[in-house]
Image: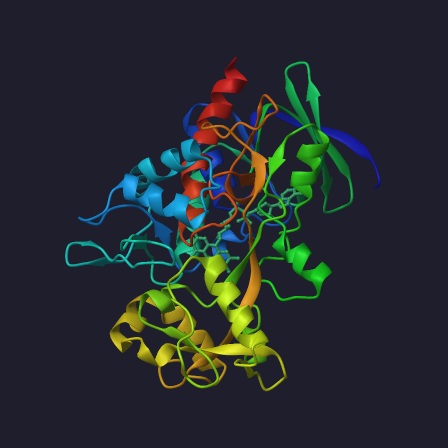
């Protein structure tokens, strides 16, 4: 590194510009804090923007936050923290209205939201913005933050956290390889998970953005923060396996919500296609191990996702991006089944937090994929964007309050 210079100081310094960091930055700014938003590369670079499927919230007539919470606990095999789950599901409807207020337009149908049932859910609860839900949410949050007076610090990669007399000091590596120190009354970590790095180490495919490398978790732990379930990594049951340009693509779970099913080489259904993610991934691994899978043209193991069962009108409303990608690659999923195999997708565990998203370090908050407990050892689809919004909002508010003290 070339030289050390001291940068600005803030009430609240948010690290990471995915949905969780953006939600925290917007909410801290609205709570009156002077906010800095530092991120490893550009503000747009994150996993959140790649999220397609949707976001869960109990709006159905037969649904409630309690039923949503039961589904989360069951999918986590009772390993989730019930207090965090209660916050997640009870604040879900208001989090959706907050996103709408910021400009997100969820797909509607018959005067209400278009709701789909996702894996592990007992009710239809998944709201969507076509199949670019994460893009819509991050765009609205980013535009809201940019319209305020908060500072943006792109190309600031966190390398160290140290306590100071009045809060915390964060050290960053910049694009020019400078080292910059910034002080803040409180820190919010929204730096995401580590599945991109983990997949590289294992020689596997991942759905993740290259910035998902996990060093912020290690930095917080080095400063003394506790973590949980870090070994519990999630495979997305439906990674794209062929054509080559779709390898590592996460085929939206909404394909299965809209009637696509998993079948083996003999065309037999071998699992509940809408089971919890770990169960569906495991069933695919076992089917292939039994010799009942198929091989992609480049020799990779796979099974079929029979997408021909999706009604064309559902596909056009809820899967237009996925259809465009596959058709662009020469395959029409409504006319033929597609190859699929599980890919590394999500870090279930992370830093231990309380209901206000504060870690075990006073004044250091964590939200989104970097935090653990809300999903236990197995996350349900659609609850991550929700976690980012609910706990990002909470983290921003609580960090602003902490900085005032
Ligand atoms: C392809 C795909 C599809 C998905 N679909 C869905 C879905 O439909 N529904 C759902 O709920 N969830 C979905 N998920 C999961 C969900 O999108 C993510 O878990 C969630 O958005 C993570 O948000 P985040 O803010 O915690 O992290 P991210 O969005 O990953 O953002 C992390 C940010 O931190 C920055 N950063 C990382 N390290 C550092 C550092 N050292 N210093 C500074 N900045 C750093 C990154 O550059 C990035 O800006 C999907 C994920 C993927 C990859």
Q: Quadrant of the N terminus?
A: top right
> In the image, is 65 to the left or to the right of 73?
left
Direction from residue 3 to residue 334 in the image, left or right: left
Q: Is residue 207 at least partly visible in the picture?
A: no
Q: Is residue 165 above or below residue 293?
A: above
Residue at left 31%, top 68%?
258
Quarter of the rendering containing residue 297: bottom right
**Residue toward you, 213 or 46:** 213
Residue 346, horizontal then vertical, whole percent: 55, 53
Q: Quadrant of residue 323?
A: bottom left
Where residue 228 sits in the image (x, y, percent)?
A: 59, 38
Pick out the residue farthest to the left: 110
Q: Residue at x 70, y 28 (%)?
A: 223
The percent position of residue 270, horizontal first and vertical second, equals 42, 74
* Residue 85 vertical placement versus 302 (above, below): above
The residue at the point 25 percent across, 74 percent down is 313
Q: Position of residue 164 (x, y in %)?
A: 69, 18
Q: Residue at x 34, y 43 (%)?
A: 70
User: In this orientation, which residue lies closer to the viewer: 39 or 274?
Assistant: 274
Visible residue check, residue 128: yes
């Amino acid at each position: 590194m070339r030289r050390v210079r001291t940068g600005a100081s803030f009430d609240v310094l948010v690290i990471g510009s995915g949905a969780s960091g953006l939600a925290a930055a917007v909410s801290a700014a609205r709570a009156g804090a002077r906010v800095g938003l530092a991120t490893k590369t550009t503000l747009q670079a994150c996993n959140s923007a790649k999220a397609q499927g949707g976001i869960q919230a109990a709006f159905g007539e037969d649904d409630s936050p309690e039923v949503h919470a039961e589904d989360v606990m069951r999918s986590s095999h009772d390993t989730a923290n019930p207090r965090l789950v209660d916050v997640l599901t009870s604040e879900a409807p208001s989090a959706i209205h907050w996103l709408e207020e910021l400009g997100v337009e969820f797909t509607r149908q018959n005067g209400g939201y278009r709701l789909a049932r996702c894996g592990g859910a007992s009710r239809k609860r998944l709201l969507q913005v076509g199949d670019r839900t994460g893009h819509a949410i991050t765009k609205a949050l980013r535009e809201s933050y940019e319209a305020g007076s908060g500072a943006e610090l792109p190309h600031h990669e966190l390398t160290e956290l140290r306590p100071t007399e009045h809060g915390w000091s964060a050290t960053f590596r910049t694009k020019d390889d400078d080292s910059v120190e910034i002080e803040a009354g409180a820190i919010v970590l929204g730096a995401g998970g580590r599945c991109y790095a983990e997949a590289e180490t294992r020689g596997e495919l991942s759905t993740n953005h290259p910035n998902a490398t996990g060093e912020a978790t290690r930095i917080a732990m080095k400063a003394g923060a506790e973590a949980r379930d870090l070994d519990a990594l999630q495979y997305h049951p439906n990674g794209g396996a062929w054509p080559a340009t779709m390898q590592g693509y996460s085929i939206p779970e909404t394909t299965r919500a809209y009637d696509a099913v998993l079948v083996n080489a003999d065309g037999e259904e071998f699992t509940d296609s809408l089971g919890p993610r770990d169960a569906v991934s495991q069933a695919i691994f076992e089917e292939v191990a039994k010799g009942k899978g198929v091989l992609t043209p480049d020799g990779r193991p796979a099974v079929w996702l029979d997408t021909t069962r999706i009604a064309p009108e559902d596909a056009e409303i809820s899967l237009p991006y996925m259809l465009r990608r596959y058709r662009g690659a020469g395959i029409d999923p409504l006319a033929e089944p597609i190859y699929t195999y599980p890919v590394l997708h999500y870090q279930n565990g992370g830093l231990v937090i309380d209901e206000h998203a504060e870690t075990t370090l006073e004044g250091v908050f964590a939200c989104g994929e970097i935090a653990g407990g809300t999903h236990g050892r197995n996350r349900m689809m659609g609850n991550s964007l929700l976690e980012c919004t609910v706990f990002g909002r909470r983290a921003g508010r609580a960090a602003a309050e902490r900085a005032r003290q």
